[in-house]
Amino acid sequence: MAMPGFLQQLRDAMYPPSRKQAILGLFQDAESAATAGDALKDAGVPDTDYDFLTDSPYPEGSLGEREEKHRLYLYPFIGALLGLSSGIMITAMSQVAYPLVTGGKPVLSLPPMAIVCYEGTMLGAILFTVIGIVFESRLPKFVLGLYDERITQGFLGLRVNAEPEQRYEVIQIMNSAGAVEVKTDQ
């Protein structure tokens, strides 16, 4: 029974309450949705406050949305470095902890260490790539926000998080661009 309260606290910590109100405009075609996006940009709504929702992929930038910045390339690099250092530590520490001197050969033998280091590097890079894909995809998403089922039937959605004083202006922009329906979270 204590779990739902904990999950609520976790969600509130990850997504602090905001004064902004969610507004969702539904459009039948991409051109009217792009027109609404351009009008919102011209009205001074920051491009981080609105997003297009579609059931099918559109080429990036075709609706006038912002270019998403990602750092996916860092995850495999960091994972590879951690895997390499883990491989070096595991092999070196085990050979030093249990020295097995045979025929005057050195305790730290590099050819067997190289194999373990290579495998550790690949394992770290692959695991961190998967973790990076999850984080860069913004998963899991605890708060879904305003949504309409008709988006899965071919409509395009334009979700805006607007300040309360911009609410009327945003609704007016969407209606003038040809929105079929405009919903608010209130």
Image (spheres, rainbow, N blue to C red):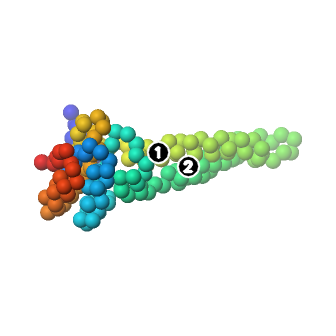
What kind of residue is marked 1?
A: Ile
Q: At numbered mark 2, what does the secondary structure look like: helix, strand or loop?
A: helix
Q: Is residue 61 visible?
A: yes
Residue 184 is situated, as x and y percent measured from the top left of the image, at 16, 48
Mark 2 is surrounded, within 10 Å at the Cα level, by few (under 14), some (14 to 19) or many (20 or more) other residues, namely many
Disc 1 vs disc 2: which is toward the camera? Answer: 1
Q: Position of residue 180 (x, y in %)?
A: 19, 44
Instruction: Return the residue at label 1.
Output: 133
Q: What residue would you read off at disc 2?
A: 76
Q: Which mark is residue 70?
A: none
In terms of depth relative to the viewer, which is nearer, 43 or 104?
43
Question: Is residue 107 among the parts visible in the rendering?
Answer: no
Report the amino acid beneath label 2.
Pro
- Seen at 21% across and 50% down, the residue is 178
Image-quadrant location for residue 171: bottom left
**Whether label 1 touches label 2, CB < 8 Å:** no
Residue 177 in picture, x, y percent from top left? 22, 54
Image coords of residue 56 (percent x, y): 38, 40
Q: Is residue 55 above or below residue 21?
A: above
Above/below status of 1 relative to 77: above
Q: Is residue 70 depicted above or below 111 in this figure?
A: below
- How many C-alpha atoms fall within 10 Å of the one at disc 1: few (<14), some, or many (≥20)? some
Q: Tell me the residue at 17%/45% (across/down).
A: 181
Q: Earlier in the sequence, mark 1 or mark 2?
A: 2
**Residue at 25% from the left image edge and 37% from the top image edge:** 150
- Toward the viewer: 165 or 176? 176
Position of 94 with respect to 159 (left or right) is right
Mark 1 falls on what kind of element?
helix
Residue 17 sits in which quadrant?
bottom left
